[in-house]
Image (tube, grey):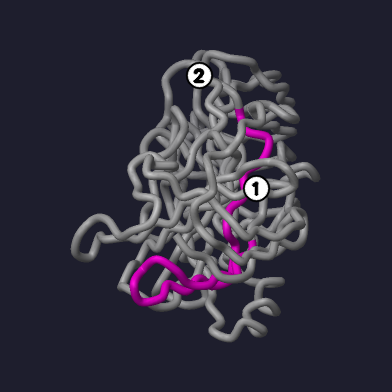
Amino acid sequence: MVMSRRLHGVAVYLVSGALCLAALTGCGGTTSHLVARRRHANAVDHAVTPTTAPEFQPVAAPARGPSVPEALLWRGNSAGAIKEGYPLLCGVYPGVGYAASLHLPLPGRVATLSVQFPTYKGPGVYRIGTRDSTDLALASLTGMNPAKTGTVTVAAGGRGGTMNVEFGFRGSGHSGHQDSLSGSWSCATPGAGAGASVAPPSSNANESLTVSGAFQGYVDRAAVPSGQLVAGTPNCSAYGSGAGSKFNLSMVVTWQGQPYILEVQLQQYQGAGMYYPSFTTQSLPIATNWATAEVIRYPQPAATGKIPSSIWAAVGGDFRLDPGLTQGRMAIRFMNRTGDSFIVTGSWSC
């Protein structure tokens, strides 16, 4: 995953196991990772404040690495066709939702286009400036105010779509003009950055986790090694202090012959109890005990300039941390940018 953290999400929690499983089909949107904390050269930080606008840091020059085809038309004080872009982000990320970021060559300059869907529910149409958070799209372009109106679609496969967005008027009188971007966009090529399979570390923790949906299987053992699986966080304990403290669970599990890191982070940690994994606080029906979770390949795909082919982030469910802080239960639904999803249910220990 080429980045994981910046704005962070919100989800509902149901105490009963049976109710939880029913809720998972609709929690936190239907149907992980940018410069700092995690595993990528450009990573989005975990933030506990609700998402209100894209905040990806603009970069002044095109990224090194392969470009992806674009078919966009820029209109402003001048007009130009954009035929290629250099992807930075493309996927779903805990606390962010779906995010895509591209360097685009505009007339006379290079700008960074960032789009974000905080309550992403799979491919479809999302609207700029909507009051309905279930189909909210956010867009920004270096040197412009955030987009004011328009739509952004995500096509099947989750690697691009179309857009028709307006960034508002600039200038005054006869010299005034409206900046806009329209056409087809893409942010990744199939399979890029998937990485080779590597044997997981030795299993040393008992689990009882059932996986159903896009993944199928049962996990009775997992690896919780002494070294950090996710940079900057412990594998099984609380960290930080005061109101900023968090709890992190990271383990290596094997599903369908491929090892993955399963990570759950309690963003609003308050000791043992129930927590509710979700993209952002906008997609969480309750405003407390927010958690984020992700599933990424092990080891982390790290090729510079590569966009991972799939990233899975939690979109609903619940997570229980028992007294003693080394075991509990989870019933979490994960989704990727294509809209595919799976559910992990059962007891965990570390």
The amino acid sitting under disc 2 is Val
In front: 343, or 322?
322
Q: Is residue 314 magenta?
A: yes
Q: Which residue is painted at 42% across and 72% down in the image?
A: 321
Label 1 secondary element: strand
Q: Which residue is painted at 74% across and 33% down in the image?
A: 184
Camera sees residue 149:
no
Most prominent secondary structure in the magenta stretch?
strand
Q: Which residue is painted at 57% across and 39% down in the image?
A: 200
Give the magenta-colored segment's residue range: 307-333
Instruction: Indicate the position of residue 10 as horizontal and vertical percent values.
Output: 49, 66
Q: Which residue is mark 1?
A: 254
Q: Which residue is painted at 52% across and 76% down in the image?
A: 285
Q: Which residue is mark 2?
A: 110
Quarter of the figure with the C terminus? bottom left
Q: Quadrant of residue 157?
A: top right
Instruction: Indicate the position of residue 214 as horizontal and vertical percent values.
Output: 77, 54
State whether residue 314 is above or below residue 59. Answer: below
Q: Which mark is residue 95?
A: none
Instruction: Indicate the position of residue 240 as horizontal and vertical percent values.
Output: 24, 55
The amino acid sitting under disc 1 is Thr
Instruction: Indicate the position of residue 162 as horizontal and vertical percent values.
Output: 73, 40
State whether residue 66 is above or below residue 268. Answer: above
State whether residue 281 is above or below residue 307. Answer: below
Q: Residues within 10 Å of mark 1 (few under 14, many from 20)?
A: many
Q: Residues within 10 Å of mark 2 (few under 14, many from 20)?
A: some
Camera sees residue 59:
yes
In front: 233, or 313?
233
In front: 11, or 275?
275
